[in-house]
Amino acid sequence: MDEDANDPRIPRPLGVWSVKEHVYPKFARIVRHFQEKGELAELPVDSIIRLTITSLAGFLAARFLLLPDHNWDDEAEMERTIHVLMNGLRR
């Protein structure tokens, strides 16, 4: 086993380990905070995080990979994405 693998003094490239160890716990804490305030559904935290990431990744994929030449209103698209996350697709 690599002795340096867990040495915090050795810099590591940003990657999955960083998201898992640094970003995910903060995101989970934020989700729980808003659930406790009654502002988010009582769904599993992992599900809320997955749905959020999926929505944002879908927006970014469409914006920069699938339709990069489309006349996007980025601010409006982000607002719509957030609206759907917070309210679903119902009227």
Image: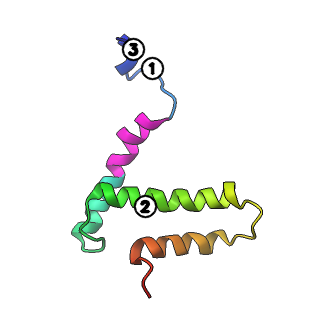
Name the image quarter holding the C terminus.
bottom left
Mark toward the start of the polypeptide (1 vs 3): 3
Q: Dominant secondary structure of the magenta stretch? A: helix
Q: Amino acid at mark 2?
A: Thr
Where in the figure is residue 75, as x and y percent of width and height?
62, 71
**Tag nearer the camera, 1 or 3:** 3
> Which element type, helix, strand or loop, lies under badge 3?
helix
Number of the label disc, if any, that sits on residue 52:
2
Out of 35 and 62, give the one closest to the viewer.
62
**Tag nearer the camera, 3 or 2:** 2
Residue that numbered label 1 is attached to:
10
Residue that numbered label 3 is attached to:
4
Mark toward the start of the polypeptide (1 vs 2): 1
Which residue is rendered at x = 43% and y = 61% of the image?
52
Which residue is rendered at x = 65% and y = 68% of the image?
74
Which residue is rendered at x = 56% and y = 69% of the image?
78
Direction bottom: furthest residue: 91
